[in-house]
Amino acid sequence: MRLYVLGSGSRGNCLAVETDHTAILLDAGFSAREIERRAELAGLDLARVAGIALTHEHADHACGAPRLAQRLRVPILTAPGTWDRLASGMGRTAHQAIGLRVVVELGPFRVEACSTSHDAADPVALAVRIGDGTGVGVAYDLGRPTAAVRYLLQNLTALVLEANHDEVQLRTSGYPPAVRRRIAGSGGHLSNRAAAELLAELHHPGLTVVVLAHLSQRCNSAADARATVAPALRRVGFGGALHVAAQDVPLPPIDVIAPGRMQLGLALGL
Ligand SMILES: [Zn+2]
Ligand SMILES: [Zn+2]
């Protein structure tokens, strides 16, 4: 399984997971054209995309979805309330509902979702698994990690988790108090410290990839997010790769391999 992080932040989010020549996009928060440009830069063939799953309707997660779904002729997967907001702009694009206890199969992927605490119509976190048990979880725009989110994100091989702001930088950011309250509140965004705590809790021997995402440009930096999260992961014995998503450029593709298979790969010299 391969994870593409085409970009993440308050100005756009787009990820993709690929296996066996099939891919699924997770959020499409750049223009269709920009997603095409970034996919090419990252080496992702969009012709392989079988569907687009959206976490919620905010523009930084969904703005490119209508056009891209039409161009690629693929369905859109969202929670029902998100589709209510988006349907009028979607033309004849097909829709599949995702949610708790609903497992949608899309080619080789099994897509599950659960509600998140965020100020959108029907926001969700996502988990995408394939037949060998490898899986990627995505949770951002997360006011607080609920029990449902903790449950959904268990036992995944890779986690893409929001590390939005440094709490001190947010307090001294110059944002008006109401904006600061919204960001730090239960409908807002997860801080570096909260991300570190959640990751330490979710850690298990099969977790090999962590990507910190949706960093605030004003109240965070890649170095600050890493400095908070890396020690927390080290303390619980995480031996995998820690990446930080960027807003403006895609990350190089990330191989997501279950630990048992990694050892087999090393033994075979792969
Ligand atoms: Zn967002
Ligand atoms: Zn949002």
Image (tube, grey):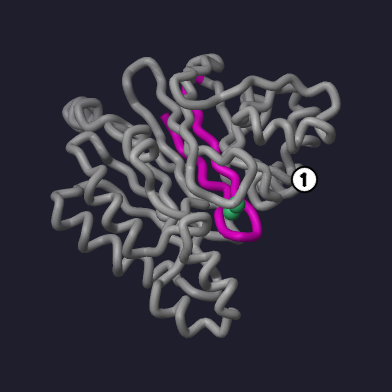
Residue 23 rendering spot, x and y as whole percentages: 56, 27
Q: Residue 83 vs residue 114: left or right?
A: right
User: What residue is shown at x 59% (from left), y 45% (from top)?
Assistant: 14
Label 1 secondary element = helix
Residue 178 rendering spot, x and y as whole percentages: 58, 73
Judge the density around disc 1: few (<14), some (14-19), many (≥20) Cα neighbours within 10 Å: few
Quadrant of the rendered structure where residue 43 is?
top right
User: What residue is shown at x 70% (from left), y 50% (from top)?
Assistant: 59
User: What residue is shown at x 35% (from left), y 56% (from top)?
Assistant: 195
Query: Would you say the magenta stretch is mainly helix, strand or loop?
Result: strand
Q: Residue 138 vs residue 263: left or right?
A: right
| Residue 26 is inside the magenta segment | no
Q: Taking 10 as reference, is 99 above or below it?
A: above
Which quarter of the figure is the N terminus placed in? top left
Which quarter of the figure is the C terminus placed in? top left
Residue 105 rendering spot, x and y as whole percentages: 52, 15
The answer as to whether callout 1 falls within 8 Å of ligand 1 is no
* Residue at which label 1 appears: 33
Whether residue 27 can be seen here: no
Q: Taking 150 as reference, is 222 above or below it?
A: below
**Which of the two residues, 197 or 257, is positioned nearer the viewer here?**
197
**Which of the two residues, 265 or 225, is positioned nearer the viewer here?**
225
Q: Residue 177 vs residue 150: left or right?
A: right
| Residue 8 is inside the magenta segment | yes
Find the magenta span and give its range. 1-20
Q: Taking 206 as reference, is 139 above or below it?
A: below
Mark 1 belongs to which amino acid? Arg
Q: Taking 243 as reference, is 135 above or below it?
A: above
User: What residue is shown at x 48% (from left), y 43% (from top)?
Assistant: 116
Whether residue 91 can be seen here: yes
Residue 180 rendering spot, x and y as whole percentages: 53, 73
